[in-house]
Every structure is written in structure tokens, then in C-alpha cells.
Amino acid sequence: MTTSSGNRDEGLVRVIGTGALGLGVINLVVGGGIFALPGLVAAELGSGAIIAYIICSITVALIFLCFAEVGSRVSRSGGSYAYVEEAFGKFPGFIASILFWFGFSALADAAITVFMVDSLAVVIPVLKSTLPRAAFIILLLAFLTIVNVRGVKGGVRLYVFNTLIKLVPLVLLVIAGLFVIDFQNLAIPEWPSAANIGAGTILLFYAFNGAESALNASGEIKNSAKVVPLGLLFGLSGVLLLYVGLQTVSQGVLGADLATNTVAPLVAVATEVFGDWGGKMLIAAVVMSIYSNLSGDMLGAPRVIFASALDENLPKSLAKVHPKYKTPHIAIIFFATVIGVFALSGTFKYLAVVATGSLLLVDLGVIFAVLRLRQVHGMPKPGEFKLPFGPIIPLLSSVFVIWLLFQMPLGEATTVGALIGACVLFYFARSGFRKRRSAAA
């Protein structure tokens, strides 16, 4: 490992292997958005949507090659936060931690919790009422909290099970759909414009968000130098194959109608392929997919809080490890509470758009961490993953991420900027308080 802090003993149990990490990546990426994605991309690019998939896959591959190198060198909990903190110090690390666990994970999880309840309310009308709705959200988060507090193995088993269950209808749709597609619908009569390709690529990058969260539990990964690169490769390859398969089947089955169906295109495709029961199966899959996302994030995101508290950036109580279950139980309970507060309010849903901007900034920090760790600690040692071609891949990745950041709407950019400003004020106010307390002592 690179430094003593990079592989410190945190009192956690290392049980996550390549398969579990790869499924965690698939679980956290394939969320509710996939059920609208084919129609949204087709609205931008028509039958030329595959072009955006190719560009997006290259972009994501470059970014996560950087994650693979840093992740193989820094094995403590926190994922992206730990990587940034290890490379640049506590202040940038603190900002990265808040952007990740709050700006990305908590707000996005609260938003999809609201969306999940809204979806269930269609078939269970009582959930439209305030008290039953609140009770359902509290019970859901309480269940996820208990499972994850009682042990990382239980949390891993839960998200692995949920991931496999939610993938079944999607994989079935791809396999069955391949036998009924009209190949004329896949022809590209006209090359899309550069503007449309850019819009489609940004849209797809949004759909790939979340793979970073699978690395939050890096302090519980068995052999980071080996498991992190292989797990990312396995997970992201699976996501890409699934996305391309769903887009191909959707375009081949619905043709030009796909571009006009941007709300529930996969439900329409399933209805065409299987009949009415297929559409109902996909509606159930929407709920299961969101629930699976939550179960995965309840495992990973609290580890960012735990790691930040361990580094004394957050209250020390959040760094406590359960004496029996060896899990960061206070951080897990705290994270679930934050999600619950925002989900119960039901008024902040628009804040979910901040998630992508927050995550892009964290990704940029991890990309630069590759170069910084090489500068400070030298090239990766034998057994650690090393990017080829010197600094070319990190530099190319940073160009793509900066370009995407410049595509953000002004309102979203302002909100992310305000969050960073609040982080800066909190950090220096807390530092000043500590100095005054030390002087008084």
C-alpha cells in the first residue's frame, strides 16, 4: 500500500470479493432511470442511439481506469473520499466526502424513495395518504438499517439477491426481444448532428452514475489490489451489455414510436413482446430496481461518513464500530435518518439534479488523485494496478469530465457551488473552534 493510512486497521471485516463488488456496481448503476432511458436516448438520436453508447462507454472506461489504479493503492473505507483525502489532504477530502454522501447519495436516495412510493401508490392507493406513506418509508429504511447494522455479510447478501432479482425481467426482455425485433428499425438513415450526439452522451453518463458508490466499502474488500480492478471491469461490462441490449430490443420492437415514449418505454416493449403480463412484470421491476439501489447504497454510503469521521472531519461518534457486528452502525443509522427526513418531506425532489454535478466533481478529484499519488509516492508497486501510457488516460478523463461539467444548467451549478461553499465555511469554522478549545486547554 501507498501509505500507512491507506491500509489502516479500521476494525471492519474484509468479506467483499470480485463477484460481490461487480454485482454491487451493476446494482448501483442500473436504477429506476433505465426504465425510461431507451426512449430518452432515441428522442435525441433516433436509431443512431448506439453512437452515444459507444462514446459514453469510452468515457466511463477512462474514468474508471483511474478509479482502478487509485482503488488498488488505497484500501481503507470511503471509496472516492478516501482516494481524494489520501492524495490531497483533509480539506479536499472533507469536501469530497460531503459532495458524495450528501450531495450525491443521500439526496438521490431520498428522491428515488419518493419515486418508489409514488409508483407503488398506483396499485396501492392507500400510500397516497400521508400517514401510511410515512409509515412505509420509515419501515423500509428501518429494515435496510437493521440488515446492514447486523453485519456486512448480510448487507452484501441482500444487495446481491436484490440485484439478481431485478436483473431477471430485464435480461428476459433482452433475450425474448431479440427474436421479435424488426431489423429494419435498427438502420441509421442519417448520421446524428454533433449537438444531438453530445446531448445523448450526457444523458447516458447520467445513467452510468453510481458505480463509484460500490467502492465506498473499500475497507471491507478482501484484496483491493486485485478485486477493485476486476470488480469494476465485471460490473461495468455487465452494465454496458445490458444497456446496449435493451436499447437494441427497444428500437427493434417499437421503431420510430420509441422516440415518443419517454416515460415508460420498457413497459411498452415488454407489453409488445410478452403481452399485458409483461408490462405488469416491468412495473414490478421498477419498484424492485429502486429498492435494490437503496439496499446497495445503504451498504456503501455510510462508509464514507464513517471514514470521514475516522479522519476527524465529522463527529467521532460516527466512526464507532459495533462491538458484535463489526459494522459502522452509528453512520448507517445517521445516513438512513438523513434519507428519511428528505423523503418524508417530499418537497425537495428537485434537489436530485444536484447529484450528478456533485459526483462529477468527486470523479474529477479521483482522476487527479492518480497523478498526485504517483508524484508523492511513486508509481504503483508490484501487485497494484497501473494505468498504461503515463498520464495520458487521467488527462483525457479530466477533459471529458470538465466538458460534462460545463454542460450543467446554471441552476444546478449554482446549487452545487452553494454546497461547496457551505462545506468550506463549516470546515474552517470547526477548525477555528478546535484551535480555540486547544488554546483554552
Image (spheres, rainbow, N blue to C red):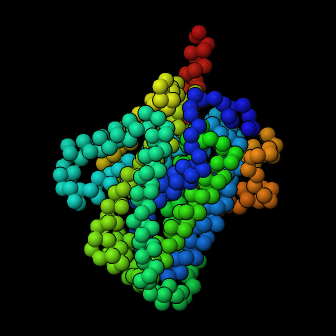
Q: Residue at x 58, y 10 (%)?
A: 440
Q: Residue at x 32, y 54 (%)?
A: 116
Pinpoint residue 269: horizontal percent, then vertical percent.
37, 76
199 or 153, which is in the foreground? 153
* Residue 49 visible at all: yes
**Figure disc tally:** 0
Instruction: Note whether 288 is above or below 157 in the view shown.
Output: below
Which of the 4 image quarters holds residue 169?
bottom left
In this rendering, would 428 be left or right of 169? right
Instruction: Note whether 223 is above or below 28 in the view shown.
Output: above
385 or 363, which is in the foreground? 385
Pinpoint residue 196: horizontal percent, then vertical percent.
53, 76
Q: Residue at x 45, y 74 (%)?
A: 175
176 or 377, which is in the foreground? 176
340 or 192, which is in the foreground? 340
Pinpoint residue 183: horizontal percent, then vertical percent.
48, 87
Q: Quadrant of the N terminus?
A: top right
Pinpoint residue 220: horizontal percent, then vertical percent.
58, 38
Which of the 4 image quarters holds residue 311?
top right
Q: Residue at x 60, y 29 (%)?
A: 10
Q: Quadrant of the C terminus?
A: top right
* Residue 317 visible at all: no
In this rendering, would 151 be left or right of 337? right
- Residue lying at the far top of the rendered structure: 441
